[in-house]
Amino acid sequence: MKLLKKVLVTLALFLFISDISWSKPNLILISVDTLRQDHLGIYGYDRNTSPNIDRLLKSGAWFDKADCNVPLTTPSFASLMSSRYPHETGATRNGIPMLDGMETLSEILKQNGYSTAAILSNWPLKKNLSNLQKGFDLYDDKFYEKRWLFFNDERDAKEVTSLAASWLESKPKPPFLLWAHYSEPHSPYQFHRGFVFNEPNRPDTETQTKIDAYDSEVAYADSQIGILLNKIRELKLDQNSLIVFIADHGENLGEHGYLGHGRYLYQESIRIPFGVSGPGIPSNQKIESQAELLDFAPTALGYLGIPPGKMMRGRNLIQPIKGEIPWEKNRLIYLETFPGAVRGEGAQNLANTKKPIWIGFQLNEVKLLYYIPGSRWQMLNLNADPQELKNLADPANQNFILYSDHLLKWFHSWEHSIAQGNTDALTESDRKKLEALGYLNK
Ligand SMILES: [Zn+2]
């Protein structure tokens, strides 16, 4: 009895000193808007744009082949939180919020007793335009009030870090979910002092200047993410938190004659950085198996020991990361993208035009794309043709027949039941902001 008492006292003392609680782990989600994978050091970029993100990803497991399912902000984040496709969430375009009935990760965590906070920085994620505030105690999308007179309608990374750090310092009741979203790499791109790359041998073109500015935005966001990560370590929150790093989509920087995202489903806009780090996750683990953005919610919930939502489509990648089950081979990843934001009459016409512009899938090195308005096919081989310039679609090719049949079957299974959120959500001032961000339908 005496011994038991001694053990209990020691244990209580240990818990007190080490500040370990019995609660579930926290979840810290750090996302960056419009961050293409190949502009990060850890993914082989030759500019040192991302020392802090690199270190974070190397402290855990990161996915070499991770793709978003839709290259548009509101649709992609609705998919991230619900693990469902845009044609299911109803958030098919920027400016159209997801449907109320979509169960999200934040709601599930709230039901499981989590304190929940989100620090936003980008116009299309405002409450009225996204419906992403569900399940959040704090959904801070108030940046637009302060910065009304500025052309740049993003919240600066410094402010995202400072608000996220203050929230952590306020000692939210554990366990908690913190989502910090950074928007720097989104256009219009700006140079940041101290984060400029202009090697003497770089080509002197307009596109290159845009790439230089984009990289400056990435490096600046990375430096602020570094400050937030230091705060997390200083508060010892890394000892009991899963930290997930992800982007909603990439960005075409002149490839395929396009600057921006949303219009095509090529790799520049689809391939994203994605990694997880936390106690129990082996460090320095580069994963070659295919992952998709829809995996985020089931993976995070899996780590926290909470079952995924019933309708969630993605996989819990924690199990294969820990070696509990083998990696899935020949994984098929579906892709879709929709036209830009519309308002007024255009919104009413959406009923006729709510179909995607492109759909597609990726299966190992094969990518199949279908342009719906023009009924055009593209079949690409990502290994032999990483720039996606050679169209291998050929009606006489057996593989093409098989693949195109499969994609059309998938599309026909939902094309007449495309979900659509409130098309009147977009106000005139929202419309102007989205136009400035290049989000309007042209
Ligand atoms: Zn975005």
Image (spheres, grey):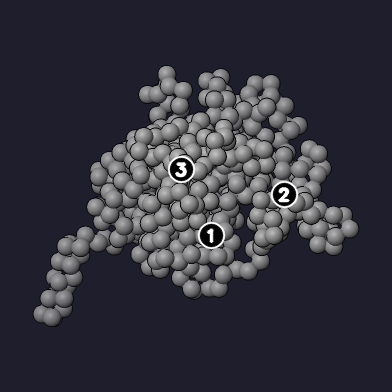
- Mark 3 or mark 2: which is in front? 3
- The residues tagged by marks 3 and 2 sit, at their Cα atoms, a distance apart of 28 Å
**Residue at image location 72% in from the left, 43% down from the top:** 358
Up the image or down, 113 lies above or below 208; here it is: below
User: According to the image, label 2 marks what residue?
Assistant: 389
**Residue at image location 40% in from the left, 68% down from the top:** 282
Q: In terms of secondary structure, where does tag 3 sit?
A: loop
Identified by mark 3, the residue type is Glu
Give how far across and how far down residue 441 sits, in percent: 66, 28
Quarter occupied by the N terminus:
bottom left
- In primary-sequence order, the first of circles 3 and 2 is 3
- Mark 1 or mark 2: which is in front? 2
Specify the quadrant of the image occupied by residue 385. bottom right
Up the image or down, 228 lies above or below 240; here it is: above
Give how far across and how far down residue 308 sits, in percent: 51, 58
Q: Is residue 420 left or right of residue 40?
A: right
Q: Residue furthest front?
A: 201
Q: Is residue 243 left or right of residue 370?
A: left
Identified by mark 2, the residue type is Leu
Q: In terms of secondary structure, where does tag 2 sit?
A: loop
Up the image or down, 258 lies above or below 8; here it is: above
Give how far across and how far down residue 108 sits, in percent: 46, 51
Q: Answer yes or no: do the residues labelled 1 and 2 have beta carbons within 8 Å? A: no
Q: In terms of secondary structure, where does tag 1 sit?
A: strand
The disc placed on residue 64 is 1
- The residues tagged by marks 1 and 2 sit, at their Cα atoms, a distance apart of 22 Å
Identified by mark 1, the residue type is Asp
**Residue at image location 49% in from the left, 74% down from the top:** 324
Q: Residue furthest left?
A: 2
User: According to the image, label 3 marks what residue?
Assistant: 199
